[in-house]
Image (cartoon, helix red, strand yellow):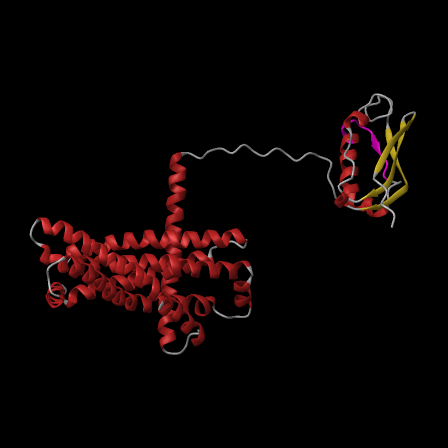
Amino acid sequence: MTDPRPAEFALLQDGTHATMRLSGEWVGQSGQTPHLAERVLLEPTGGLGSPDLRSIGFDTSGLGRWDSGLIAFLWQLRRRASERRIAFDERGLPEPSRRLLALLDDAPPPPLPAQRRSPLLGRLGAASIGALTGTGELSSLLGSTTLRAGAASLGRAKMRTHDLLDNLYDAGPAALLIITVVNVLVGAILAFVGVVQLRRLAADSFVANLVGLALVREMVPVMTAIIMAGRTGGAYAARIATMQGNEEIDALAATGIPVGDYIVLPAVLSLTAMMPVLYLYGCMVGIAGGFVVAISMLDITPLAYLQQTRAALPVGEFVFGFAKSIAFGLMIAVTSCRIGMQAGRSAADVGSAATSAVVVGIVGTIALDAVFAVVANAVGH
């Protein structure tokens, strides 16, 4: 098998006309396609820089295979000839190459307009409008999901039971391990800190009160919500963003399947339903973690510690934490689904959607917890 002939060109001038002979195989993938040599094409004699040159033609009798490498070469040559007002005669070129060259414009692209920085008031206004628009869209999604949840309870929603069960498992039993590890460690840390500090005041018997109240009122609902925002909320956003990129959302809409019923409703219902369960489980394992540390460090019986914990935790404390966990779960699920629905269609948008969902879920959890703290103080709880 013979090696392919290398791509070569030669510019031969005869008076005011020059002929460029093209020979060899002009295949761009070979890496041997010659670029325009300025020292040749701008020579005063025998090049495009000649003052007598008025037109240029082509001889392709020796031309072998060619692809876009030849087109790029000819386009660059035509632009150089246009700059020097030299006629470019394409009649000697292969017909397919002439059709491809006809699609290329010789004019340089227009310069990009200078970007003017908008005034501070304008940026604040745009940010405010964007925030209000996002809040309205999120409220609309929350309202429609609530209505569809009511329809689902009556069996009128187009939601598959299989999807709901899968989401329930993912948001519940599949998350028990990380919920256990985090809340046990949080309970143990609270007990250790409480023992060290309260022992100085001879009030180490109140460690059970500290651990129980801190876990039930604040730490367990907040930590559980943060875990689920990073684990489940990000997964919801990434999954919906991937469906958006694969045009599955458009396909569902085209076939008349409500996207809210098919995708959003199972996710929202499952996370909202599982958060209270995870909260109660987190309280149990967190108190167990504090119990182990306190018993090992204090001179107190296990029964006395449990009785102290029971006295410090009336049912109202659990009801308050229960309500917080439901609100956290609903907020994380709705915002994550909304972020996924608004994602672009590229692979990078999937990662951006997951990151945004995690950040919004964590920040929203802390902000919502602050609202609950204000409400609890107002009602004297």
Residue at horizontal 32%, vertical 62%? 179
Image label count: 0
Check the image and report above or below for 313 versus 40. Answer: below
Is 360 positioned to the left or the right of 317 in the image? right
Is 160 positioned to the left or the right of 199 in the image? right
Q: Where is residue 139 in the image (x, y as percent from the top left)?
A: 36, 59
Check the image and report above or below for 132 versus 143. Answer: above
Q: Position of residue 242 (x, y in %)?
A: 51, 59
Q: Give the range drawn in magenta.
A: 82-90
Residue at far left of view = 202
86 within the magenta span: yes
Is 263 positioned to the left or the right of 323 in the image? right
Is 284 positioned to the left or the right of 334 in the image? left
Residue at far bottom of view = 155
Q: Where is residue 335 in the image (x, y as percent from the top left)?
A: 38, 58
Where, by quadrant of the figure, is residue 29 drawn?
top right
Where, by quadrant of the figure, is residue 33 drawn?
top right
Residue at horizontal 44%, vertical 72%? 163
Q: Is residue 102 visible?
A: no
